Amino acid sequence: MKIEDRLLTKNRTIANVPERMKHLTWKAGIGLLAVCLGCGGGSQSESGATEAVPVAVDQSLQPLMEAEEAAFEGLNKYARINSTYVPELKAIEMLLNDSARIAVVTREMTPAERKILAEQKFQYRSIKIAVDAVALITNQANPDTLITTAELKDVFEGRRTQWNQVGRNGGTGKISVVFDNNSSSNLTYLLDTLQVADRAKAPIFAVKSNEEVIDFVKKNPNALGVIGVNWISDSDDPKTPKFLDGIRVMAVSRTPDPELDDYYQPFQYNLALNRYPLARKLVMLSKEARQGPATSYINFVTSDRGQRIVLKAGLLPATQIIRLVNIRSE
């Protein structure tokens, strides 16, 4: 199956609604394929054992980075990546205290975090690898699949508490917002993006993982779940149909008084055109100053092969050229 075909299938799977299919295709420059194959993997000790590169990953990005890790190790005989999937703040802490050589997260370091590195005499690198999205999901029995960013902010600030106060389809019941954990990057991103004034009053419920968020939404008709979109966007992942069964993916508008065409779901096409309001960049943070195992892994993720994995995962590649294709149904 061509990449184009996979993407088209993926969009149908997530959206459940579009009459007009839009997707991305890949356009790679000559010679890009070879960028990473010579990067090398983990270094070998004198005994022949492979040195594992410790990597701390925001757990909302687990499906994507598991695929990157498997591909990198498969191409490099001596490569070993030891990934730990933790909340974003913990991932950065692991980089700062030298428990990880790379942190894969959804934000840049804060001034306080950069100060710690400066005191350690380290200069860090930040490499953009993809554009991701925060997806809002509801129970399939909930008729509301539309929401504006203003309505979402009101939900977080307690001004809208019922489903009949958002969207257009007149849902009923009290809105129950669920995140993957109290230190979730998904939560932090929404609170920052929506500029929620009083975060302590945000009516949220935390579980332990993005997978548990999906399960909670399936079992609770009034739930509003918040997850990283890569958990449900890769149609080639055998887990994706299972995750999508029983949920709906909401369309979001940044327009105060929107028409139906002003709402967008977290598709690659909408990410590429900056239409989906809840998009965010993914970065790899590294303290490695010279070429080494950690740098080799970063080079792979940003190479043609690594960016194809990003594309396949339903996200927007950061370092390669893409072109947009419209497919209209008759």
Image (cartoon, grey):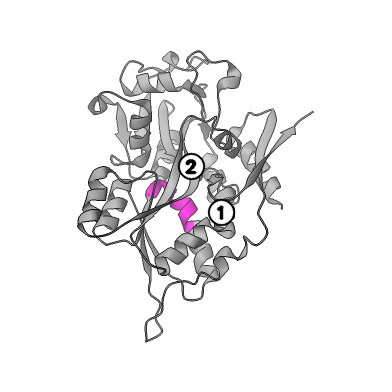
Snapshot quadrant of residue 122 = bottom left
Q: Main secondary structure of the magenta part?
A: helix
User: What's the residue at 56%, 47% (across, down)?
Assistant: 234
The residues tagged by marks 2 and 1 sit, at their Cα atoms, a distance apart of: 13 Å
Residue 169 showing in the rendered view:
yes
Residue tagged 1 = 307
Under mark 2, the amino acid is Asp
- The image shows residue 306, relative to residue 73, as above or below, that is above
Q: How many marks?
A: 2
- Dots 2 and 1: beta carbons under 8 Å? no
User: Would residue 315 appear left or right of 48 to someone viewing this image?
Assistant: right
**Which portion, as a residue range, is magenta?**
59-66
User: What's the residue at 57%, 15% (across, down)?
Assistant: 259
Residue tagged 2 = 132
Query: In this view of the protein, which residue sits in the foreground, 45 or 108?
Result: 108
- Can you say which quadrant of the picture contains the C terminus? top right
The extreme bottom residue here reads 47
